[in-house]
Structure formats: C-alpha cells, structure tokens
Image (spheres, rainbow, N blue to C red):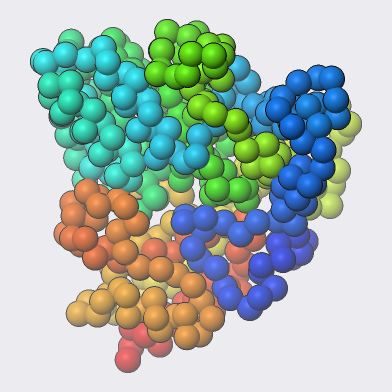
Amino acid sequence: MTYDVESIRAHFPALSAGTVHFDSPGGTQTPLSVGQAILGTLTGPLSIRGRRSPSERNADDAVTGFRSAMADLLGADPLGIVYGRSATQLTYDFSRHLARDWAPGDEIVVSRLDHDANIRPWLQAAGHAGATVVWVDFDPATGELPAAAVAAVLTDRTRLVAVTAASNLIGTRPPIAEIAAAVHQAGALLFVDGVHYVPHAFVDLAALGADFFVCSPYKFFGPHCGVLAADPALLAGIHPDKLLPSTDVVPERFELGTLPYETLAGVSAAVDFLAGLSELATGVAPRPSVSRRESLRVSLRLAEAHEDSLRGRLESGLATLPGVTVYSRADERTPTVLVGFADRPAADATEFLFERGILAPAGSFYALEASRHLGLGETGALRIGLAPYSTAGEIDALLAAITEFALR
C-alpha cells in the first residue's frame, strides 16, 4: 500500500522550519488541526460544565469528547479514562492511592527497562508502606525483557507489577499480554507505562491485559498532558483524597479541580488526526460506516509499517559504520534507535548533527536504570526516534551526517 508522507507532512507547520526532527520519543510535532481545536475551544464560549448554555455545553462536550476519543484509541471504556497533567503525575497519584492497601511484607515489582516515571513513584510508595521492592532485569546484550523473567519473581505477596510496554530508550516492546497473564495468576495488578508504545502501535487494552495503562498525547501529535485508562469497576474501588463538595463519580473523582477544556479538545483532535492518517497517506477515504476505532487500526498499522521500513533503512546504514554501537536489538521494538560511538561522547554527535539541521538528542532520557544497565551510566547515548512524518530522505541525510562524524 502506498504511503504519501508528503501529504501527511503538509499538516505540520513546524516541519517547514527546516529542522529535521528525530526527537519524536520526547514529543512529536503538532498538526494544524490540533492547534485549531485548542484555539477554537479556548476562545469560544466556555464556562463550567453543564447543558444549559452554549458555554456550558462546549465545556461538557470537550470532556466527553476527550474520553470517547481516548477510549477509541486505547480500546477502553470512556468511563475509565482519567485526565492528568502528565503520565508521571498520574503514576505518582495512583501509586499513593494503591499503596494505602500495602503492608510490610508485600512486594512491588519494577523493571530496569522502564522510564523512571514508572519506577520511582513505586519505590517511594513502597518505602512509605514498608513494602519490599523486587527488581526485574532485562538482557543488556539483546534488550529483551521476557515474560519468564517477570514470572520468576512473582510470589503470593506480590501486589503490583510496573512495566513498560515499550522502552523510551531502546524501543524494546516486552510481551505485555504474557506478563499480564503471569501477574494475574499471582493475584497482583499490572501497571503499564504506554507512553512510548501508543505512538507506534494499535493498542488493545483487553488483549494486553493491563489493569492500569498510562500514556501522553504529546507523543502522538497532541498537547502536553497525560491519560490513564482502567476498568471503571476497578477505579470505583479506589478512593483518593479530594474536596468534600467534589463529585465521587468515576473517573471524575481522580481529576482534581476544573479540567483544561482546550487541552482535552486538542487531544480529541489528535486522535482524529491519527484516525485520518490512512486517508492522507493513501488518498482512499474510508467508508462512511467505518468507526473511528477501525480507522485508527488501519492508520496506525500503516504508519507502523512505514516507520519499520525506515528503521530498517537506518539500521542497515549504521551497521556498516566502524566504532558505532546500536543498543536497540530486541526482536520486537519501536522505531527508536540508541547509538553510541567509540571514544566519542554522544553529546558531541548531537551537536554535530544539529549544525547540519538535524535534531537527535543524546542522554538517558529519564530511563536512568536502563542506561546504567547497558553500561552507559547517566550519560546515555544518541537517540534517534522516527515518526509517521519521517522520510527516507531524512534517514539518508542522517546517515550521511553520522558517517561524517564517525569517520572524523
């Protein structure tokens, strides 16, 4: 199937500025339609939610539209969609909520593959509760985190397992469904960081088996915020601290204060843009009867194929260069490639590339435990992240620049 990347790029004003962006794991560029949705909501009639006046309805529609859009994107129940300022904030919040039921002797499992946002909140909550933290290591040679490694540490005292669906550092996609089966057999809960997974895969929460799943819309063309998805029945059993007059209805009980309606409208617009990627890329409009969920499935799988093709092109080019180490090696991985250079700081490569109009940052990107486990310490390496708007020409320009740097 054809993939007209230029048709997609035409919707991103930032891409005309001249910089080549390989920084999508830190946040994608934003299509015009998302900015227009934010502007239209913020400057239109707007007030506290209700159904009487246009301003009340606009606010209410922004909230319900957001929950519906994210439910379609994740395969979730709209009543299980919780807004947060960030995935980090939501993880901290829920670590506190859940830790109320933990006691000394209980065990919390975390992975060294994860972003610190899915490690530190659980370590700190476990410390407050007197619970024990159990670590699961990934294989630094392959980047793999097999389900068996998680299953091996589970006991009847395990209360929660926190693991990423995709490493933001090396792209590894652990077998979440297999991990979920083992976790649930042990009678524990599974909290999945999907921040780096959602931009590169069609998500089906039921198939994954995650009890809690967090993601960040700014990683897939939306505004800066976080989203948590869970079964509404599970959320109903969790009672956060809140103001007395505020509603106790799920999911609103977890969203403290008035919501940013303009941000929610931007998230909905981002999901709609994702759903329309297939039509932009192929020129073929979906049948009127096709649901947004089905359009997302087609679009995201088409984008995934495009990104994987570019990743292959990139990795083939890197494999020919002396003194270059690629740490992204798992069989199942996102189009995110971590690269190191013999006797050369990765930060120097970032500066070299930027002088040539290419943005590819270096660091550990908050995946501190993973970087250390790879032997890269806190410095990390050069991270190259692809997006649905990346092109083969950009890959070739990047490879030419890295070749020049590596051979200097």
Residue sitting at 33 percent across and 41 percent down? 117
Report which quarter residue 391 is drawn in: bottom right
Q: Determine if residue 153 is in view.
A: no
> Disc count in the image?
0
Q: With respect to residue 151, does 312 lie above or below? A: below
374 on left or right of 53: left
Residue sitting at 76 percent across and 64 percent down? 10
Q: Determine if residue 346 is in view.
A: yes
Which of 129/111 is in front? Answer: 129
Q: With respect to residue 247, does 258 lie above or below? A: below
Residue 152 percent coordinates (x, y):
17, 24
Residue 86 percent coordinates (x, y):
47, 41
Quadrant containing the C terminus is: bottom left
Residue sitting at 43 percent across and 32 percent down? 90
Which of 169/312 is in front? Answer: 169
Which of 232/61 is in front? Answer: 61
Which of 97/379 is in front? Answer: 97
Give the residue at the far bottom of this rendering. 408
397 on left or right of 66: left
